Amino acid sequence: MNYQVKEEGKFKYLESRADGEVVMLLHGLFGALSNFSGIIDAFGPSYRIIVPILPIYDLPIHQVSLDGLVRHVKDFVKFKSLSDINILGNSLGGHVALLYTLEEQEKLNSLCITGSSGLFESAMGSTFPKRGDYEFIKKKTEETFYDPKVATKELVDEVFEITTDRLKAIRIIATAKSAIRHNLADKLYKIHIPTLIIWGRNDIVTPPFVGEKFHELIKGSELYFLDECGHAPMMEKPDTFNTILLDFLNRCRK
């Protein structure tokens, strides 16, 4: 992944090319660009992959919420004059993608969620990382995946750095509480664009029944479970994930 993060005004983002079919990726609370490296490498040359960095740690504390993140995505889409977007979100990014879809559906071509919050939030803060306890952070990060080796030292160090920064930790807690307040069970019927749901069969953060519930509530959605896979399928099973995603995007092409 050799793409550089651009900074323009209040926006930080990665963009693989200046034209082509748009695939916008929304990251979760921890790990932004690195989580999507498999998608960026596979799709970047032929699709216009755009990854806005969500300002989870930059918003004024009174604006820290899912509404604030959705507002940022709206402003970014307007700033970049994007349309016919294929939007994909993982974990909290899936939650933001769902909220954005409910408000701006006419700007989208398709939606993909994986390990998304929005229906089941018990994992978002019930055992919030103990500040300064590296082994605890390492264990919690490893539990995100079926294969603990996916939690590289670089990723664990990144999560540890975030959780030991008091101001960042406060923002994570505020964001997690906002996610709990934004349960979407009674709104998902409004989504009518093509929707792909890819879920880890061994996800303990958002268990498989959550993926099944999203599938039930989003009419016409497609659901795929990946075996021996946890909360971030695009990281643990990148080849299978990308094959499913490519087939879906091809069928959604206008």
Image (tube, grey):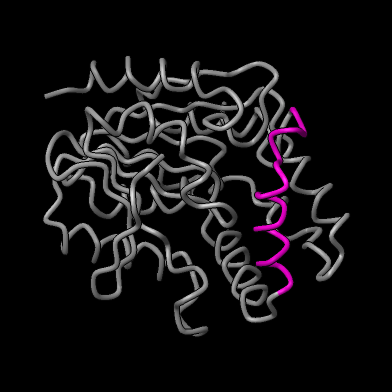
Q: Position of residue 193 (x, y in %)?
A: 26, 33
- Front in this rendered view, residue 52 or 211: 52
Q: Which residues are magenta?
A: 147-164
- Specify the quadrant of the image occupied by residue 159: bottom right
- Main secondary structure of the magenta stretch: helix
- Front in this rendered view, residue 6 or 222: 6
Outermost residue, front side: 2
Above or below, 71 against 234 in this view is below
In the picture, which quadrant includes the N terminus? top left
Q: Position of residue 140 (x, y in %)?
A: 79, 49
**Quick check: 89 left or right of 210?**
left
Q: Position of residue 124 (x, y in %)?
A: 68, 56
- Specify the quadrant of the image occupied by residue 110: top left
Above or below, 236 against 190 in this view is above
Above or below, 93 against 204 in this view is below
Q: What residue is shown at x 74% (from left), y 47% (from top)?
A: 141
**Total marks placed:** 0
Q: Position of residue 15 (x, y in %)?
A: 27, 48
- Front in this rendered view, residue 50 or 61: 50
Residue 87 inside the magenta-drawn segment = no
In the picture, which quadrant includes the C terminus? top left
**Quick check: 245 left or right of 23?**
right
- Specify the quadrant of the image occupied by residue 59: bottom left
- Front in this rendered view, residue 221 or 86: 86
Residue 154 inside the magenta-drawn segment = yes
Above or below, 121 against 163 in this view is above
**Quick check: 22 left or right of 135?**
left
Q: What residue is shown at x 72% (from left), y 52% (from top)?
A: 156
Q: What residue is shown at x 26% (from left), y 42% (from top)?
A: 16
Q: What residue is shown at x 34% (from left), y 53% (from top)?
A: 4
